[in-house]
Image (tube, coloured by chain):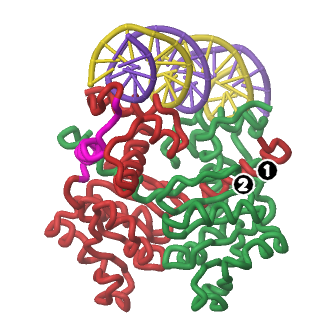
Chain colours: A red, B green, C purple, D yellow
Amino acid sequence: MQKIPKPAVKRLAMYYRCLERLREEGKEVTSSKEMAQRLGIKACQIRKDLSYFGEFGKRGIGYNIDNLLERLKEILGVEKAWKVIVIGAGNLGKAIAGHRVIKEQGFEIAALFDIDRRKVGTKVHGVEIKHMDELGDFVKKEGVKIAILCVPKESAQNAADEAEKAGVQGILNFSPRVIKANIPIENVDIAVALKSLTFQIIRRKGKHE
Amino acid sequence: MQKIPKPAVKRLAMYYRCLERLREEGKEVTSSKEMAQRLGIKACQIRKDLSYFGEFGKRGIGYNIDNLLERLKEILGVEKAWKVIVIGAGNLGKAIAGHRVIKEQGFEIAALFDIDRRKVGTKVHGVEIKHMDELGDFVKKEGVKIAILCVPKESAQNAADEAEKAGVQGILNFSPRVIKANIPIENVDIAVALKSLTFQIIRRKGKHE
DNA sequence: TAGATTGTTAATCGATTAACAATC
DNA sequence: TAGATTGTTAATCGATTAACAATC
């Protein structure tokens, strides 16, 4: 199968959300042009990205929204809810675990994990906090596939190792440290994002488009 | 001045943190090779990225860590603390406002903003929650340059508009919606990151390297 | 038919990598 | 000098965009 550009996959996830919104607005059909306008990208980019996976539109007409949503669900693998755990039940971990978007987009937070025994046994938004010792068994028993890392950077690599050992298949890393593993990792790096902003701001002075 | 690849800027921010860590370990000198190993990238990539901004190393020797850190500080524009506000004092906004990494990396959370008057006046990690009505005045008086958006997607565009109008110069957007503005925006999209993971996981089955 | 929009090819643009002279 | 490592050039690789035939 053809190699898919990494940025294209991220855009597919954005098309998915854009289509959901169009559907909420009562539309049944859309075009690459309409979606492109909303997303601030080029229409041909959308058609190109979709073309890696098949032909989903009708020439002269556009795309049936329900149909394209189904297709994107299959492509992204989100037909059924994925079980997710959050490792690290600090403020960030708890906030992520309770975040609307995770449920809305079809993920299920199965548990949080922490090393602090005072937290263990309590619940956050209806989800139990368990001790790290239970992680291995829980992942296997529940079939957890994804771990969201919200631990301090000092313990990030350890937590990632434990998750991988337990059989987790992908990691979403919120800790500001590069972690190494043999499973896919997505990094959300607040400090890097902020510095990228400051760089752009100082280089922009004067040239306001 | 030469055009700098966007990914290169993000990497510079990663080099910065890597160097801080090397310094903590007591090292005074490092090489592109050493950093590359830690970051999981190629050494020539690091040298190339740095070369956009000057010559910071000594051939045959490597880079002086303190010196390179200073240079990166200038390049990224983080010599002095930037004032940042968080818009949206829900769980996520509060967690971000109190997050270690923001202070450690030289940013200062000046205030949180919310429309819920029951929250207004209370404090989170020593930072006051103010009402959205005060945003314009506050940003001007305090010289706030960056806003972190943690509002529900329904009000994301509005909040961004208000921030831009008030004079904010960059936005870090945590809400799962594309927002439009004439200032730099960085997006942190949890749903997109999770779907990018699921895509990789389902395509990976069987080919474990 | 005329207008609209897709899917795809080919061209362009941008980013990464290899290789090596320069030099500490 | 020998070994190490930089800075930079040129080659390669990957992603985006323009353009247009196909077709509804």
Amino acid, disc 2: Thr
Mark 2 = which residue?
Answer: A198
In this view, which residue lies farthest toward the left?
A141
**Image location of residue A150, percent across then percent down:** 44, 69
**Image location of residue A77, percent across then percent down:** 24, 48
What residue is shown at x 30% (from left), y 69% (from top)?
A: A85
- Confirm whether residue A78 shows in the render: yes
Residue B20, numbered circle:
none
Front residue of this view, candidates B193 and B183: B183
Mark 1 = which residue?
Answer: A202
Q: Is residue B38 above or below residue B4?
A: below
Say which quadrant the C terminus of chain B sits in: top left
Front residue of this view, candidates A120 and B117: B117
Q: Main secondary structure of the magenta part?
A: helix
What residue is shown at x 36% (from left), y 79% (from top)?
A: A114
Spatial CA span between label 2 and label 1: 6 Å
SS state under label 1? helix
Front residue of this view, candidates B172 and B161: B161
Q: Is residue B123 above or below residue B113?
A: below
**Tags 2 and 1 both on a single chain:** yes
Answer whether labels 2 and 1 touch (C-beta < 8 Å).
yes
**Image location of residue B98, percent across then percent down:** 59, 78
Q: Residues within 10 Å of mark 2 (few under 14, many from 20)?
A: many
**Image location of residue A175, percent across then percent down:** 49, 64
Based on the picture, tell me whether residue B103 belongs to the magenta stretch: no
